[in-house]
């Protein structure tokens, strides 16, 4: 953690609890040419989170007075993923990193303070490193500080030379052979005194290989007047910047492992970390076991004592305590406590499985509530339905919920029973305790407690199990039915 008492002289807290002398800028206007993508680099996700949001959340723990994000390429799309507390600033033309900072500063008054500049393509950079960069910068009382690291493979990055209070950064494409031999690189994170960076930006020239205004030149300019220094990165893992897809995969792997480690530390068993993908946003309760080949994504929340997987893929899905989800896909579904899903079930948006219910092999469920203890065990499609409690849906029962134009609802009352291959032609209501024979095609409501068979289904008597049938327990039983 940051030292706190010596920090007091340099850090002023505003009434909001924010650091009133810290302004932060994330540079996120570039295209990311080396990604070879139709999407701006900042929108590529790592563990489900757009790249730009990693820099933002690391900066946010420093509580800057303002956090600006310079957007340009696909500005609308990038704006759309930013958190509320980040202020987008539009850079109309991508004239270089120096120009990007100039645009951001247009909206900042002429007060004193520290400007933290962070390239948006360093998703592993930690809040600790950013905090230390700012702290060192302030306690050294210099005009500019840049985060640098000695890397075994410096290729593609700006090379940093430091000499007696002057820091010179040369881009690889502008570098001489000798300069390229230097392994000390610029990681694209800087702390500047606002008063220094303001005038230094005015001195930049675009006389370089790319014809851009390089922010990096500001370090040399500032260094010659006041002082500029480097701060060395401690944990080299954080130097995993993302310029191409291979680096994207490497950075994501680091984040993915960290997420898994955090869950394991909190009491989740991850059987095979190599094949388990859990996005940054997912929550999991203790003593839950996540089996190989499982993807947990988006706003998925898993309770405790669950078994998830193998090979399950849940997106924005809530799973209650003690539930089982095996070889299944969930999208915007809710699985109640103790419920059982799969193998090979597909739960689509609006699926609600109440406590102790079951959706078994090769079933698809959409916009449907399955009541407490009810079972949809085999080969069914349930769409736009409400299934009461203690219902048994026979194998192959299908809701015909769509007539080519309209979607219609199916209501199935408590304790009802459908035989195998029942077709429920919606809209239709099956009363409590009703009993449908195998192969029946139901296009009219079936009253509670009645048994219906055939195509179209007609009521033939009371459902078995009703008082009036008590003397003949096989009365009216269809020839084929599912097991319980
Ligand atoms: C930059 C540094 C380089 C450093 C590297 C670290 C310069 C001149 N060079 O090079 O020394 O080693 O980062 O990653 O700064 N951006 C804008 N507007 C622009 C141009 C860029 O917002 O007009 C943003 C990009 O979206 C990106 C960041 O600035 O997030 C860096 O730009 P990029 O083009 O990736 O710079 P590099 O060539 O990698
Ligand atoms: Ca870059």
Image: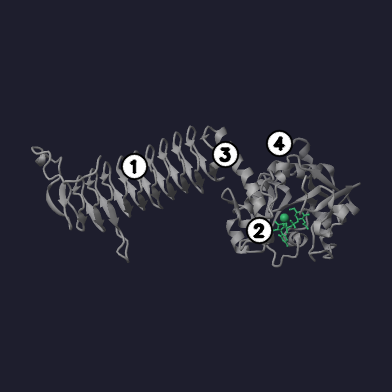
Which residue has dot 4 on it?
1
Q: Which residue is drawn at the image coordinates 83% and 59% (left, top)?
A: 174
Dot 1 or dot 4: first in sequence order is 4
The residue that mark 1 highlights is: 358
Q: Is residue 190 visible?
A: no
Q: Residues within 10 Å of mark 3 (few under 14, many from 20)?
A: many
- The residues tagged by marks 4 and 2 sit, at their Cα atoms, a distance apart of 35 Å
Q: Nearer the viewer, residue 331 or 80?
A: 331
Residue 363 on image: x %, y %: 35, 49
Q: Is mark 4 within 8 Å of ligand 1?
A: no
Q: Which residue is mark 2?
A: 35
Element type at marker 4? loop
Q: Nearer the viewer, residue 117 or 48?
A: 48
Residue drawn at (55%, 34%), measured in percent from left and top?
Answer: 264
Q: Earlier in the sequence, mark 4 or mark 2?
A: 4
The disc, 1 or 3, on the residue closer to the chain's N-terminal end is 3
N-terminal-most mark, 4 or 3: 4
- Calculate the distance from the C-alpha at mark 1 to the C-alpha at mark 3: 29 Å
The tag on residue 318 is none
Q: Nearer the viewer, mark 1 or mark 2?
A: 2
Reading the image, the residue beneath label 3 is 260
Q: Work out which quarter of the rendered image holds the C terminus and state it.
A: top left
| Picture quarter with ligand 2 | bottom right
């Amino acid at each position: 953690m940051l030292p706190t008492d010596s920090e007091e002289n340099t850090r002023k807290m505003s009434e909001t609890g924010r650091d009133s002398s810290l302004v932060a800028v994330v540079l996120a206007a570039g295209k990311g040419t080396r990604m070879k993508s139709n999407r701006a680099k900042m929108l590529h996700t790592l563990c489900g989170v757009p790249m730009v949001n990693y820099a933002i959340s690391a900066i946010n723990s420093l509580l800057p007075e303002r956090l600006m994000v310079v957007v340009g390429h696909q500005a609308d799309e990038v704006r759309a993923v930013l958190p509320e507390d980040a202020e987008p600033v539009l850079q109309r033309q991508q004239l270089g990193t120096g120009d990007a900072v100039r645009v951001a500063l247009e909206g900042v008054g002429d007060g004193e303070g520290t400007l933290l500049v962070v390239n948006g393509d360093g998703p592993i950079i930690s809040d600790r490193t950013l905090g230390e960069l700012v702290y060192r910068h302030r306690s050294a009382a210099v005009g500019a500080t840049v985060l640098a690291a000695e890397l075994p493979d410096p290729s593609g990055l700006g090379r940093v030379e430091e000499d007696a209070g002057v820091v010179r950064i040369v881009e690889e494409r502008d570098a001489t052979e000798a300069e390229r031999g230097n392994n000390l690189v610029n990681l694209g994170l800087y702390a500047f005194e606002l008063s220094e960076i303001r005038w230094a930006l005015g001195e930049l020239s675009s006389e370089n290989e790319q014809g851009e205004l390089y922010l990096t030149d500001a370090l040399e300019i500032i260094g010659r007047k006041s002082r500029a220094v480097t701060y060395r990165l401690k944990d080299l893992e954080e130097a995993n910047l993302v310029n191409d897809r291979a680096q994207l995969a490497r950075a994501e792997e680091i984040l993915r492992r960290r997420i898994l480690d955090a869950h394991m530390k909190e009491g989740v068993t991850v059987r095979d970390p190599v094949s388990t993908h859990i996005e940054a946003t997912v929550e999991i309760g203790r003593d839950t076991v996540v089996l190989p080949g499982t993807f947990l994504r988006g706003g998925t929340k898993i309770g405790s004592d669950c078994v998830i997987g193998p090979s399950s893929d849940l997106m924005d899905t809530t799973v209650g305590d003690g539930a089982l989800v095996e070889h299944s896909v969930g999208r915007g579904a809710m699985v109640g406590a103790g419920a059982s899903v799969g193998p090979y079930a597909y739960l689509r948006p609006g699926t609600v499985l109440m406590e102790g219910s079951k959706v078994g092999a090769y079933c698809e469920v959409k916009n449907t509530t399955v009541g407490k203890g009810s079972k949809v065990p085999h080969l069914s499609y349930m769409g736009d339905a409400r299934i009461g409690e203690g219902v048994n849906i026979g194998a192959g029962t299908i809701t015909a919920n769509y007539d080519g134009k309209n979607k219609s609802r199916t209501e199935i009352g408590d304790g009802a029973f459908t035989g195998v291959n029942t077709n429920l032609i919606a809209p239709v209501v099956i009363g409590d305790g009703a009993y449908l024979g195998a192969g029946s095609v139901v296009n009219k409501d079936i009253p509670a407690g009645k048994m219906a068979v055939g195509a179209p289904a007609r009521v033939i008597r009371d459902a078995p199990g009703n008082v009036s049938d008590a003397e003949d327990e096989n009365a009216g039983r269809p020839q084929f039915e599912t097991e319980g």
